[in-house]
Amino acid sequence: MKNQMAIFIRDNQDEILGKWQELMKNDSEELFFQVISQAVIVKTSREFSELMISNLVENENNYEYRLNEFTNKVVRFGWSILFIMKAINHFANVVFEMLEEKEIITEQNTKEYISIFSNWITPMRNGIVEKHEEKWELTFKLQKNVLQELSASLIPVFDKISVMPLVGSIDTERAKLIMENLLEGVVKHRAEVVLLDITGVPVVDTMVAHHIIQAADAVRLVGAKCMVVGIRPEIAHTMVDLGVDIKGFTTTSTLQRGVEQALALTNRKIVEVKEV
């Protein structure tokens, strides 16, 4: 009977997917059906249908492969677990209603079909949720590693002057990486002035402020001067409210002003050269 259902779905795939897409558009706040091109929607819908079918067919060897491939794709599209659950439920409901319309499901066999649907849908839900969670965890770890690598490097911009741009939230783990790279960079580049640019740090709370102060103190201990730049008005207000002691280092509102002050500290300045 499951194989017969698989044949029915494949034979009526266009109609099933048409009804399924309408339900998904009307019942979901996700942007997939609003912003993605029709060609991609059609292709992804068919892949979803084939995945649903493959879980019905006995001894189907491609199910795990299809499950992995489809989950990879929907994670890239940003499908949430709720969106996936709706997709599975709507697909099953459309199939059930069409089987009733075709009088394949009757009063005599309804109970049997309900059991088949339950055994079909439940493993689908569990399998996709498990794979979805695995993919999101992997994606999150990769993004976190990339962010750490990109946002914790000391960059020499002038002789004796280096900048470390900080991007994203700063937790204890990132603070440790920042400190290590900062001290190594100061020695490697023989920096006399270091600018910590916090323009890309969205929130400065007590813990973040503590990490910044620690970094500034560590720079001074290795013989360099530290400046914190990119302090927006709301961050300045927050730091004052938190009672953060910033007397030990210079602060500026922008990186440009910080560079100008750093040049002055190293007895240099930017001058405009007039054309001859």
Image: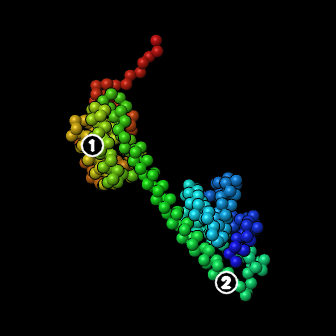
Q: Is residue 239 left or right of residue 275?
A: left
| First along the sequence among labels 1 and 2 | 2
Front in this rendered view, residue 146 or 119: 119
Which corner quadrant holds the N terminus? bottom right
Q: Residues within 10 Å of mark 2 (few under 14, many from 20)?
A: few
Q: Is residue 221 visible?
A: yes
Farthest residue to the top: give it: 276
Residue 135 lies, with reference to residue 1, above or below; the image says above
Front in this rendered view, residue 166 or 60: 60
Q: For the residue labelled by badge 2, is the local secondary structure a helix, a strand or a loop?
A: helix
Q: Quadrant of residue 13?
A: bottom right
Q: For the residue labelled by badge 1, is the local secondary structure a helix, a strand or a loop?
A: helix
Residue 222 lies, with reference to residue 206, above or below; the image says above
Front in this rendered view, residue 7 or 101: 7
Query: Disc 1 marks which amino acid?
Result: Ala
Q: Is residue 30 visible?
A: no
Q: Residue at x 41, y 50 (%)?
A: 145
Q: Residue at x 78, y 80 (%)?
A: 103
CA–CA distance in space, label 1 to label 2: 71 Å
Q: Which numbered mark, 1 or 2, is in the foreground of this view?
A: 2
Q: Quadrant of residue 180?
A: top left
Disc 1 and disc 2 in contact, CB within 8 angstroms: no
From the image, tell me which residue sits under label 1: 216
Q: Quadrant of residue 55?
A: bottom right
From the image, tell me which residue sits under label 2: 112
Residue 243: where, in percent of width, then height? 27, 52
Q: Residue at x 49, y 63 (%)?
A: 133
